[in-house]
Amino acid sequence: MAEKITPRSVDYSQWYIDIVLNAKLADYSPVKGCMVIRPRGYAIWERLRDELDRRFKETGHQNAYFPMFIPMSFLKKEAEHIEGFSPELAVVTHAGGEELEEPLVVRPTSETIIWSKYRDWIQSWRDLPLLYNQWANVVRWEKRTRLFLRTTEFLWQEGHTAHETKEQAVQETETMLEVYRAFAEEYLCLPVIAGRKSEAEKFAGAVATYSIEAMMQDKKALQAGTSHFLGQNFAKAFDVQFQTREGGLDHVWATSWGVSTRLVGAIIMTHSDDKGLVLPPSLAQEEIVVVPIFKSDNKATVLEYAGKVVAALKADGRRVAFDDDDSSSPGWKFAEWEMRGVPIRVEAGPKDAASGNVVMVRRDTGEKTFVKVEEAAAKAREILAAMQKDLLEKARAFRDANTRDVASLDDIRAFYGKEKKAKKQSEVDGESHEGTAEAAGGYARGLWCGGRECEAALKAELKVTIRNMPFDQQADCEGSCCLCGAPAKHRAIFAKSY
RNA sequence: CGGGACGUAGCCUAGCGGCUAAGGCGCCAGCUUUGGGAGCUGGAUAUCGGGAGUUCGAAUCUCCCCGUCCCGACCA
């Protein structure tokens, strides 16, 4: 059979699409830019969602649900907000066979409808803080879509909190970004950089936006989560005031924060290879697949043996698939389960049954281990734990190897200019051989003055933008802006991004 | 939203104005097989993306629309 997955070295975009479609994570819908999330894809989202939800509850948040239809007038109450979102709104003008008096916007985000209710619910400082989250779908009419990464409709969570003081709201913004950072690294094996967004990149209506940024295998950055300090902007727009401890009146301070199904795309693009999906064990629908290898004359023996292995693994708490289908060959099954990203494959055949072993194969490294059957459960646990750790470290090493300190615009040009040469070279060669490692680019780290102009100029010239200003790298920012030479204020990460 | 490419069975592809739209993969049945995508025999599956037009005749030519991919613009 023909190779199903386009190698990364040939066409990174096509590789990504091939994985999503062939691993049956998602499919296209009849409506442009929308996607159907299939069970294997949704399972990843479910696991991710459940763990994140647990972490939200642990930090004192509650879930609620607000409607998807928002009166158009609500969005107009916050000037920057409507300006930022209006190009991508879907609007309902007719319902029940009649034209509506006021058009309804299908939510692109829920700040406005939520704040319209917070106005009713918040009277006193005793009502604060209000720490709500909702899991929902949102719609943004995107011009250019990509499965999971940018779709017209997507699933996400949006936290919306209200606080008594500015300090508390800022604290909440930072706390939630830290929840995202820890979650991304521990659970998704995505090494991320937590930092503050530039003015140009911040959320429409926010005072400050923070993000976690991940690097994909093509060295482009992907914003994996955001947390916004909204100041009193929405409280003022929706007139949400409360009585302070001192008896005065003040507008409440707000935050919002979210991650979306885009994370599924980030996971795919960070860990997977040319054989298919690679998943962190934490997210895998099945941690282990057991493939019995039998002939017709030993089928019963082998199946019984393999069945015992399955039982032992399940008894140890593992999520196990048992592929005892007799119509496809072992080789087929191996390839198929690798495509699906199952972390461990256990092979159990007649030779193993005779020797009391099984073969354990690790998805990310391909490493084969012969294990005594009574040690299989312990060994599986060990491999899964190692894989969870190694995937993060491998991604971190890749990122660090593709991060460079820059001091001038020429440094940046050289950093990304190489990529152009590499592309031209590969065009000459007809095909490139090395995979993504050959392309230049990645994160450029340098001092920045904070000015909008030099950031915009950089974007215009190289399509490189400021991803964020890492929290842990703001000490010692003396020097000049690597873009314009003015006195620097921050240290920023520059990169091409999704 | 502009430029380009593409759309033929579940998937990939041939056919590019003329007879009943062809092949591979997959699928179904049976036999045989199974340690890295097996084999044989038989079988089913196509409003040729949709619509309109040109023509004696359209998968094939023209126009419009829809969708996917790539480039650009845009993008909390």
Image: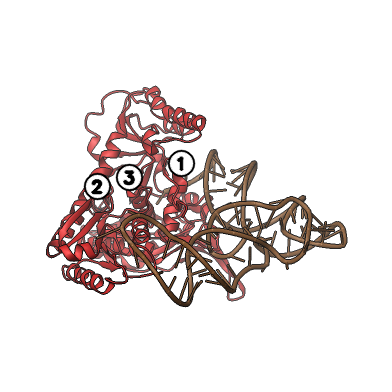
Chain colours: A red, B brown
Residue A187 pos. (x, y %): 24, 55
Task: Look at the image and tell me in which quarter the C terminus of chain A lies.
Answer: top left
Q: Which circle's residue, 2 or 3, is located before the other in the chain?
A: 3
Give the structural element (helix, strand or loop) at label 1. Answer: loop
| Residue type at tag 1 | Val
SS for callout 3:
strand
Relative to A176, say whether A351 is above or below: below
Asked if marks 1 and 2 touch (Cβ < 8 Å), the reply is: no
Q: Chain letter of disc 1?
A: A
**For the residues carrying marks 3 and 1, which lies nearer the camera in this image?**
1
Residue A381 percent coordinates (x, y): 17, 59
Relative to B15, does residue A98 appear above or below in the rendering?
Answer: below
Asked if one can make out residue A142 in the rendered structure from this viewpoint, the answer is yes
Q: CA distance from mark 3 to mark 1?
A: 23 Å
Q: Which residue is mark 3?
A: A214
Whole-angstrom CA distance, mark 2 to mark 3, is: 11 Å
Left or right: where does residue A31 sit relative to residue A129?
A: right
Q: Both on one chain, marks 1 and 2? A: yes
Q: CA distance from mark 1 to mark 2?
A: 25 Å
In the image, is A354 to the left or to the right of B9?
A: left
Amino acid bearing label 3: Ala
**What's under tag 2, amino acid-wise?**
Leu
CB under 8 Å between discs 2 and 3: no
Of residues A54 and A451, the one nearer the viewer is A54
Q: Choose between A380 and A88: the one closer to the eye.
A: A380
Mark 2 or 3: in front is 2
Disc 2 marks which residue?
A392
- The crowding category of the residue bearing disc 3, from other C-alpha atoms within 10 Å (few below 14, some 14 to 19, many at least 20), is many
Mark 3 or 1, nearer chain start: 1
- Residue B33 horizontal/vertical position (percent): 36, 65
Q: Is residue A248 visible?
A: no
- Residue at the disc numbered 1: A10
